[in-house]
Amino acid sequence: MNGADSQLPGPPPTSQFTGRAAYALSQLYYYLVAIVAIGFVIGGTIAALIAVRQLAWPDPWSVTRQSVEALLQGLAFAVPGALAAWWHLGQARKREGRVAAGAFWGRSLYFHAVAFLAYVVALGGVVVTLFSLIDAAFAADCPETIGRDLGFLVCTNADDALRAALNGLIVVLVAGTVWWWHLREGRRTVSP
């Protein structure tokens, strides 16, 4: 090899990276997921409280059964959102100040961005699964033919709801696996 070949540009030495950008991207992931999860908590809590108000002071056209179902649906958003926010905020606090010198920000960006996307999809899958289980629980007395052709009331039977719940679990499994692997790898890029 001659002297000219040794001058070819290669990957930059890792020592030029302080690790601060990789760390900031990692922390950004935790806080962004927590923000999205708080959105689930706010929306779910509002829906649940409106349902409680309907139970306590019913609208003339509302049915208690519908209010209970609405309460459970609100909780299907609020509870997973609260758990996600709690865990991610705890992880962000736990990792405060952990800067790995030499960590490249590009790897951190990739792994944490994919983890963010996968987590939001998995959280959506959890909500779909819970909604479907609620539908299955309330499907027993639901007449299948009322208004189906008119489009104003479509009832889901228990089998359809359970199939939808299984579909939601498939989403959770796939997205959860992608989330777990990418977050693990993202943590490795910023671990000192």
Image (spheres, rainbow, N blue to C red):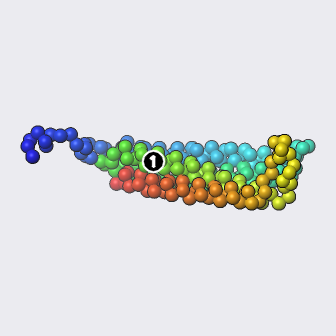
Q: Residue at x 62, y 50 (%)?
A: 124
Q: Which residue type carries mark 1?
A: His
Q: Is residue 57 visible?
A: no
Question: Mark 1 — residue?
Answer: 112
Left or right side of 101 for 132: right
Q: Residue at x 38, y 55 (%)?
A: 188
**Residue 152 on image: x %, y %:** 83, 42
Q: Residues within 10 Å of mark 1 (few under 14, many from 20)?
A: many
Q: Residue furthest right?
A: 60
Q: Is residue 155 visible?
A: yes
Return the residue nearer the eye: 129 or 116. Answer: 129
Left or right side of 162 for 189: left
Q: Residue at x 54, y 56 (%)?
A: 174
Left or right side of 11 for 144: right
Q: Residue at x 49, y 54 (%)?
A: 178
Task: Name the image quarter holding the C terminus.
Answer: bottom left
Return the residue nearer the eye: 12 or 156. Answer: 156
Q: Judge whether 9 appears above or below 65 on screen.
A: above
Picture mark count: 1
**Residue 184 on image: x %, y %:** 43, 56
Q: Residue furthest left?
A: 2
Return the residue nearer the eye: 119 or 156. Answer: 156
**Residue 76 on image: x %, y %:** 69, 53
Which element is circle 1 on?
helix
